[in-house]
Image (cartoon, grey):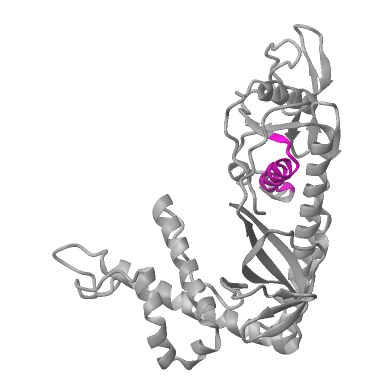
Amino acid sequence: MLTFNYRYRIYPDIAQQTVLIEWMEICRGAFNFALREIKDWCDSRKCLVDRCSIEKEYILGSELKFPGEVNQLNSLPRAKKEFPCLSEVPSQVLQQAIKQLHRGWEYFQARGFGFPRFKKYGQFKSLLFPQFKESPVTGYHLKLPKIGAIPINLHRPIPNGFTLKQVRIIRKADRWYASINIQCSLSVPEPMPHGYPIGVDIGLEKFLATSDGTQIKSPKFFKGLQSKLKLLQRRLSRKQKRSHNYEKQRIKVARLHHTIDNTRKDFHFKQAHALCDAGDMVFMEDLDYSVSAKGMFGKHMLDGAFGQFRTIVKYVCWKRGKFFGEVDARGTSQECPNCGGVVKKDLSVRVHNCSHCGYTTDRDVAASQNIRNRGIKIPQGKNQESLIAI
C-alpha cells in the first residue's frame, strides 16, 4: 500500500474560520474530559492495599473499569444529550479527538514516559475528517460536512489511481492548510545499492559537506531572525492576555515562527534534491540528534534541524529511486579516509592532515569520505527503512 500526504493551502471565509475554531475548542474539551477520566482512574489505583490517602488520591469503586477507547467512544451519544454543543461537531471528527488521546496513551505505555497532557486554550490546532462517501476535492474547492465548499490552492494535482482517504484541517498562525491522505494499492520495491556513492557529513559550522568536496554554509534561519522575534515576544508579554491587541501580537509571533519553519524546510528539500542529482547512493551518520540538542549548542542544533533533514533526504532518495543508507558515526572525524589510519584531532582543528600518508583535506570533507567508505560496505540485501508520507 502506497500512502502520501499532500498539503494544500485553503482559504476559508470569516464564518467558516469561526466554525472551525469553535469545533477545535469543542474537541479540545472532549479530549481534556476523557484525559481527566483516565487520570482519575489512575490516581484511584495508586494507594496501598490497606489504606488510601484522602488528600491526593481519588476514591473510586474497585468495580469501575478503566475508561478505555471503546467505552469513551460509546459514551459520546449520551454526552451529546447532556452537552448539546458536542452535536455541532461531526460525529467522526469528535471521535478522532478521543482516538488521538488513546494513541498517546498507548505510546506512553510502550515507552514508560510521556503521559498525555491537558491541552490549553488554542493548543488544539487540527481536525481530522476520516471518511468521505465521494472525493471532497471538486475543482478548486474542498467540500467538508457542515462547512461547505472552501477554496483550495491545488498547486499540484492528485495523481491518477490514488484514492482520497482522509483530510486533516490544520491551523498555523493565521493560515489554514488541508493535509490530504491518498492511497494506492501498489508495492514499490526498495532501491538497491547502485551507481555513484556520496557521503554526507552535517555540522554546525558547515551545514553539510560531501565526499566530493562540496560544502554548504549553515543558513541559521532562527538566529538570523532572533532579534526580530525577541522584539515581537517582548511586545506580546506587555499585552493583556485574551485581549484583542494580545491576539494580534500573538499572530505576529506565530507568523514569524511559521516563516522560519517553512524557509528551513524548503532549504532542506532543495539540498536533498541536490544530493540526489550528484549521486545514486547517499550515506549519512546514524546519530540521535535529540541528545545533542540538549547540550550547550542546543539552540544551534535545533536551528539546523538535522533530524528533519535526514528524514527528508531519506524520503527524497526513495521517491527518486536512489539508495539511502546510515552508517556508524563513531570515529568518522578521527580516521584518515585515504589510508585508514587514526588521526586524533580536537574540535578546534578544522583541517585533516594525516601523519601516516600525508593526505590533507578539510576536516568535514574527510569525515564525509569516511562515511562514504563505510556506506559502500553495507550488505546488498540489507533492508532500508523508507518514509513514504511526509
Q: Is the residue 60 above or below the residue 378 in the image? A: below
Pick the front one: 385 or 374 = 385
Q: Is the residue 294 above or below the residue 136 in the image? A: above
Q: Residue furthest left?
A: 50
Quarter of the figure with the C terminus: bottom right
Number of marks drawn: 0
Pick the front one: 262 or 5 = 5
Pick the front one: 163 or 305 = 163
Q: Residue furthest top?
A: 356
Q: Residue 229's quadrant in the figure? A: bottom right
* Residue at 75% in and 40% down: 204
Pick the front one: 323 or 55 = 323
263 with respect to 62 (left or right): right
Task: Find out whether residue 115 is within the magenta segment.
Answer: no
Q: Position of residue 280 (x, y in %)?
A: 77, 31
Q: Residue 242's quadrant in the figure? A: bottom right
Q: Position of residue 268 (x, y in %)?
A: 78, 48
Q: Is residue 126 visible?
A: yes
Magenta region's main secondary structure? helix
Q: Is residue 253 visible?
A: no
Q: Residue 150's quadrant in the figure? A: bottom right
* Residue at 62% in and 34% down: 286
* Residue at 16% in and 63% down: 49
Q: Is the residue 215 above or below the residue 79 in the image? A: above
Q: Position of residue 310 (x, y in %)?
A: 69, 42
Q: Position of residue 57 (x, y in %)?
A: 28, 71
* Residue at 61% in and 85% down: 22
Q: Which residues are magenta?
A: 304-323
Q: Is the residue 94 above or below the residue 204 in the image? A: below
